Image (tube, grey):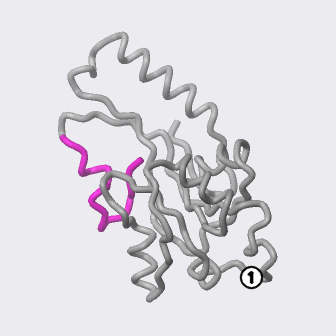
């Protein structure tokens, strides 16, 4: 995953020149909360409610802040990150046993709600998308077996993905 924000150091164009890539999908974000979360009883879901409840953050690529936090800061809002965990699975487990909000990619959220007792909510602010990429070293670019694997993975992944509610788009 790479951020598409122009101010992010995790942009697609920051990959080393020896790395080849193919876009699989552009994706948005979804908030996940446990099935009996107090947020679900509120009349309005927005930035105020989003910033009121604690959050579980996934530590990703050596960073504890990402473009969501940058956007909130621009708006003069902050969120309380109650804990930081090393994986999205750990974040979901924390969220399903607490009042913490878990923010994940919309593609991942679609999978997560099938496995975990979580309810999806739209991210209440607009932020740039992220890109899901297939990446490989350019030394494997012409390798027939590697080419077959890349094409097979691309076909399987993009056929599995189905856009819903404008959260992401598929590159075919």
* Magenta span contains residue 5: yes
In the depicted structure, whether residue 140 falls above or below residue 39: above
From the viewer's perspective, tell me whether residue 170 is left or right of residue 136: right
Q: Main secondary structure of the magenta part?
A: loop
Residue 41: percent from left, percent from top: 81, 76
Q: Which residues are magenta?
A: 1-16
Farthest residue in the top direction?
144
Q: Residue at x 58, y 61 (%)?
A: 102
From the viewer's perspective, tell me whether residue 31 is left or right of residue 24: right
Q: Residue at x 48, y 71 (%)?
A: 81
* Relative depth, front residue between 105 and 24: 105
Residue 8: percent from left, percent from top: 31, 63
Farthest residue in the bottom direction?
76
Q: Residue at x 54, y 50 (%)?
A: 90
Specify the quadrant of the image occupied by residue 155: top right
Image label count: 1
What residue is disc 1 on? 44
Residue 7: percent from left, percent from top: 30, 68
In the depicted structure, whether residue 145 falls above or below residue 121: above
Task: Assess disc 1: are there few (<14), some (14-19) or many (≥20) residues with their C-alpha within 10 Å of its C-alpha.
Answer: few
Residue 52: percent from left, percent from top: 60, 82
Specify the quadrant of the image occupied by residue 35: bottom right
Q: Residue at x 29, y 13 (%)?
A: 143
In the depicted structure, whether residue 68 falls above or below residue 63: below
* Relative depth, front residue between 85 and 155: 85
Q: Give SS at disc 1.
A: loop
């Amino acid at each position: 995953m790479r951020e598409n924000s122009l101010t992010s150091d995790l942009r697609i164009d920051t990959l080393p020149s020896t790395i080849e890539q193919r876009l699989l999908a552009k994706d948005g974000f979804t908030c996940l909360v446990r099935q009996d979360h107090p947020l679900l009883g509120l009349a309005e879901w927005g930035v105020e409610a989003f910033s009121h409840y604690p959050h579980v953050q996934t530590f990703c690529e050596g960073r504890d802040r990402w473009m969501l936090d940058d956007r909130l800061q621009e708006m003069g809002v902050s969120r309380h990150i109650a804990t930081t965990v090393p994986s999205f699975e750990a974040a979901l487990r924390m969220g399903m046993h607490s009042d913490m909000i878990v923010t994940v990619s919309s593609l991942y959220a679609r999978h997560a709600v099938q496995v975990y007792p979580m309810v999806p909510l739209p991210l209440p602010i607009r932020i740039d998308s992220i890109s899901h990429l297939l990446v490989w070293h350019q030394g494997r670019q012409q390798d027939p077996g590697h080419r077959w694997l890349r094409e097979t993975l691309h076909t399987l992944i993009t056929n599995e993905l189905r856009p819903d509610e404008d959260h992401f788009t598929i590159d075919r």
